[in-house]
Image (tube, rainbow, N blue to C red):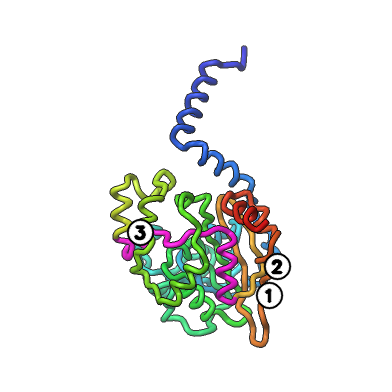
Amino acid sequence: MSFFNPNLLAARARRAYRRFRAEGFGLLRDKYQQTRLPTEWAASSSAAHLFSDKVGLEIGGPSGVFARGAALPVYGWAERVDNYNFAGDTAWVRAQRPGQTFVFDSRKPPGYQAFGEASALDAVSDSSYDFVLSSHCIEHLANPILGLTEWRRVLKPGGALLLVVPHKDGTFDHRRPVTNLSHLIEDYQQGTTEADRTHLYEVLRLHDLSRDAGSSNFAEFETRCEENLSHRCVHHHVFDTRLTVELVDWVDFQIVHVQLLRPFHIVVLAHKLKAQTTKNNLPFLGRGVPPVWSSPLPADQRIYRRAT
């Protein structure tokens, strides 16, 4: 019996051709580049003490990336994780209720669930938490610096921030330009609110609907964008690794570790400065820094070419 089956080979070739026509060379290239990113968090063992048996707050979520056995398994380490979300029903999670209802780990008692703006944690006192978590949330904020400033406020001195941001090259934002830090600073200084529509035209023009599982057609997507104050699905800002590092530095966190993880996560571990200490983030901002410059993703490589 021969293992050579011309009909099977022809069928596979037709499927590959249809996929190429549907996705294009660019998406196939992007998927290849993403496979060159690691799946494991290099700082996992050394950073566990920042979260083990401690109490933290997650903004948005719950997030699979923080689950027990995942790349950043903070839920398994922590004593308790509380949650702050903009509403009880969102595009990502349904029927959340206030109180001790946030199930972050099935083996542990639920954390406390509260609702409100991510950039106005009015229900949280200063220096309340040992750590703050956020995954794929900051891009949904019209005023990211205001959000990070609030997250720093509720951290104890020396408390940890674990921030996960989607890299533009792996998302439906890949056609959009990366936001400049100066624009984020301007939003902060002008007090931009979540009702901001500055980027709506750009989103509607450059959004890659083929990468967006949340909308089946453009009309549905346009309606969702127009009603963003209710849905919060729009990415106001677009991030690469460099912008993420610059943002965390500007808000006066001390950066500890930066890494890209598959499929397109930018992971930044930082902590709130203690009294009488000063930050030094030059190792993460200078030319030739491996977390940024060795990235296989095109947006990061373009920064390298400009810098050299």
Looking at the picture, how far across and down is residue 172, in whole percent?
45, 50
Name of the residue lying farthest toward the top:
1
| Residue count near mark 3 (Cα–Cα under 10 Å), binned few <14, some 14–19, many ≥20 | some
Mark 3, secondary structure of its residue: helix
Looking at the picture, how far across and down is residue 100, in whole percent?
43, 73
**Which residue is found at the position 59% from the left and 51% from the top?**
262
Residue range (magenta): 227-252
* Count of labels in the image: 3
Q: Name the residue nearer the viewer: 254 or 304.
A: 304
Image side of residue 254 versus residue 65, left or right = right
The disc labelled 3 sits on which kind of residue? Leu
**Which residue is found at the position 52% from the left and 81% from the top?**
153
Looking at the picture, how far across and down is residue 64, in whole percent?
52, 57
The answer to whether residue 57 shows anywhere in this view is: yes
Residue that label 1 marks = 280
Mark 1, secondary structure of its residue: loop
The disc labelled 2 sits on which kind of residue? Pro
| Residue count near mark 1 (Cα–Cα under 10 Å), binned few <14, some 14–19, many ≥20 | some
Q: Where is the C terminus found, in terms of image quarters?
A: bottom right
Q: Earlier in the sequence, mark 1 or mark 3?
A: 3
Mark 2, secondary structure of its residue: helix
Q: Name the residue nearer the viewer: 99 or 116.
A: 116
Vertical position of residue 266 compared to residue 283: above or below: above
The picture quadrant where one finds residue 273 is bottom right
Pointer 1 with pointer 2, Cβ within 8 A = yes
Q: Is residue 67 magenta?
A: no
Image side of residue 191 versus residue 5, left or right = left
Q: Earlier in the sequence, mark 2 or mark 3?
A: 3
